[in-house]
Image (spheres, helix red, strand yellow):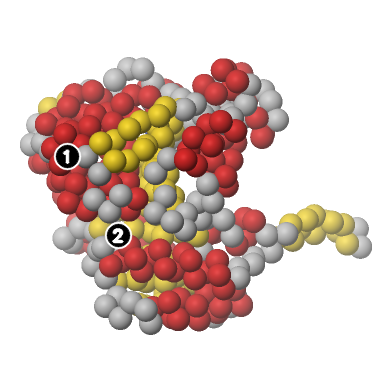
């Protein structure tokens, strides 16, 4: 298979971790007979330095023409960087919002998986962790409360602020289809999270999700209220497979789900549009505090590349190979400093990439 991948290393640790992910992709290409063609573009602070803006139209156009985008992270030291002495729409993170919008990435997927080797980092009790957990949070990214009409006004001398939460059935249907498609590649269970006991938008959400479910008879659908879901995530995380939810609920629940894994350097993510196209990136930021020191954990980015293989290229076998190589390296006791524990061997960013690539 021939695939065109745009890479956006970005700032801070971005270039170090994207380099390792490409090393692993190259090994996949060599082992399974594929050709991955890379085009590197700038975004974030490095683009501001080169072009005066966080994302150029040329960079966005290159991303549009590609089959998938692999992103490191953007941004600098917020309290201590010239990149932040400007209007918000010229700061590094504005590039991120612009590319998500420009590529119409409406579906955000964040897996939360607990490696048994890293269970010590999980803040939950052993009896709650049980056999571990393996879920993905599918969050709608371009609608709902964050994108609705908003205003602040003074009414009878009192300040009043209003935000509106709107979803139409098409927006709900397209994200529900993505969630069911992904469930078909996993354990075939969707829990749709809403607040249908209170909100009209949630009642429409539930109705449309049920309609979509009819096209996926193999997938078991359940509904859960968001307040209950927040509790269930820390009481019984093992029950979840695909969690489907709207923008604001997903914002909160995906952070909760990722924090119970305890390891920020291990968390991958993907944002997809209506076709197979997606942008793949670690859930963490550019970590300027450790940039250039070989301390960054590249696994979140490597696992994001595995998601790219699975969701954009339909290369499930290859994605499995990357995920099991990560598993093997952890089982053999190799750790970057952020996940180091007693009795393990500490390795730097590049060595971790080598070890994973060697096991494919
Ligand atoms: P961060 O995720 O960059 O770092 C938080 C902490 O986790 C730091 O101590 C860091 O050293 C550590 N860490 C993060 N990733 C790691 C890795 N792979 N290996 C080892 N340790 C790791 O969050 P922050 O410090 O709040 O933000 C730093 C910059 O990143 C800011 O400019 C912020 O705006 C930006 N940011 C970008 C994105 C993105 O590009 N998607 C996301 C979040 C934050």
Ligand 1 within 8 angstroms of badge 1 C-beta: no
Structural distance between the alpha carbons of marks 1 and 2: 30 Å
Tell me the element at label 1.
loop
Q: Nearer the viewer, residue 317 or 333?
A: 317
Q: Is residue 308 above or below residue 20?
A: below
Circle 1 crowding by C-alpha within 10 Å: few under 14, some 14–19, many from 20: few
- List the single residue furthest toward the front: 2
Task: Determine if residue 340 is in view.
Answer: no
Q: Is residue 88 left or right of residue 197?
A: right
Q: Nearer the viewer, residue 234 or 28?
A: 28
Which-is-in-front pick, marks 1 and 2?
1
Q: Is residue 159 left or right of residue 11?
A: right
Q: Quadrant of the C terminus?
A: top left
Q: Residue at x 60, y 70 (%)?
A: 168
Residue 192, quarter of picture: bottom left
Task: Determine if residue 203 is in view.
Answer: yes
Circle 2 crowding by C-alpha within 10 Å: few under 14, some 14–19, many from 20: many
Q: Residue at x 16, y 60 (%)?
A: 131
* Nearer-N-terminus badge (1/2): 1
Q: Quadrant of the N terminus?
A: top left
Q: Residue at x 37, y 79 (%)?
A: 215
Which mark is on residue 33?
A: 1
Which mark is on residue 139?
A: none
Q: Position of residue 330 (x, y in %)?
A: 14, 39
Q: Nearer the viewer, residue 126 or 63?
A: 63
Q: Is residue 135 left or right of residue 56?
A: left
Tell me the element at label 2.
strand
Q: Which residue is mark 2?
A: 135
Numbered disc total: 2
Q: Residue at x 60, y 68 (%)?
A: 167
Q: Is residue 323 above or below residue 4?
A: below
């Amino acid at each position: 298979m021939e695939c065109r991948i745009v890479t956006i290393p970005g700032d801070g640790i971005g270039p170090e971790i994207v380099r390792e992910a490409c090393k692993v992709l190259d090994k996949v290409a060599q082992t399974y007979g594929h050709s991955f063609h890379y085009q590197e573009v700038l975004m974030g602070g490095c683009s501001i330095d080169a072009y005066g803006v966080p994302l150029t139209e040329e960079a966005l156009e290159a991303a549009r023409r590609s089959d998938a985008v692999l992103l490191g992270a953007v941004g600098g030291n917020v309290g201590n960087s010239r990149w932040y002495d400007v209007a918000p729409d010229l700061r590094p993170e504005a590039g991120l919002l612009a590319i998500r919008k420009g590529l119409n990435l409406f579906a955000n997927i964040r897996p939360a998986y607990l490696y048994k080797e890293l269970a010590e980092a999980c803040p939950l009790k052993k009896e709650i962790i049980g056999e571990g957990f393996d879920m993905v949070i599918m969050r709608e990214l371009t609608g709902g409360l964050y994108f609705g009409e908003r205003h602040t006004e003074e009414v009878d001398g009192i300040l009043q602020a209003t935000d509106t939460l709107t979803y139409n059935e098409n927006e709900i249907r397209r994200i529900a289809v993505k969630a069911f498609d992904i469930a078909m590649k996993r354990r075939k269970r969707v829990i749709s999270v809403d607040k249908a006991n209170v909100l009209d938008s949630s009642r429409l959400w539930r109705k449309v999700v049920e309609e979509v479910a009819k096209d996926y008879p193999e997938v078991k659908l359940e509904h859960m209220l968001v307040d209950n879901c927040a509790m269930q995530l820390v009481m019984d995380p093992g029950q979840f497979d695909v969690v489907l939810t709207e923008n604001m609920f997903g914002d909160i629940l995906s952070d909760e789900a990722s924090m119970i894994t305890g390891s920020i350097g291990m968390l991958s993510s993907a944002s997809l549009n209506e076709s197979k196209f997606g942008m793949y990136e670690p859930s963490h930021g550019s970590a300027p505090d450790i940039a250039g020191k070989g301390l960054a954990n590249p696994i979140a980015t490597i696992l994001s590349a595995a998601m790219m293989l699975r969701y954009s290229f339909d290369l499930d076998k290859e994605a499995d190979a990357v995920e099991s190589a990560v598993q093997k390296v952890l089982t053999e006791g190799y750790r970057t400093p952020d996940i180091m524990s007693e009795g393990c061997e500490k390795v730097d960013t590049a060595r971790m990439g080598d070890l994973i690539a060697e096991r494919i």
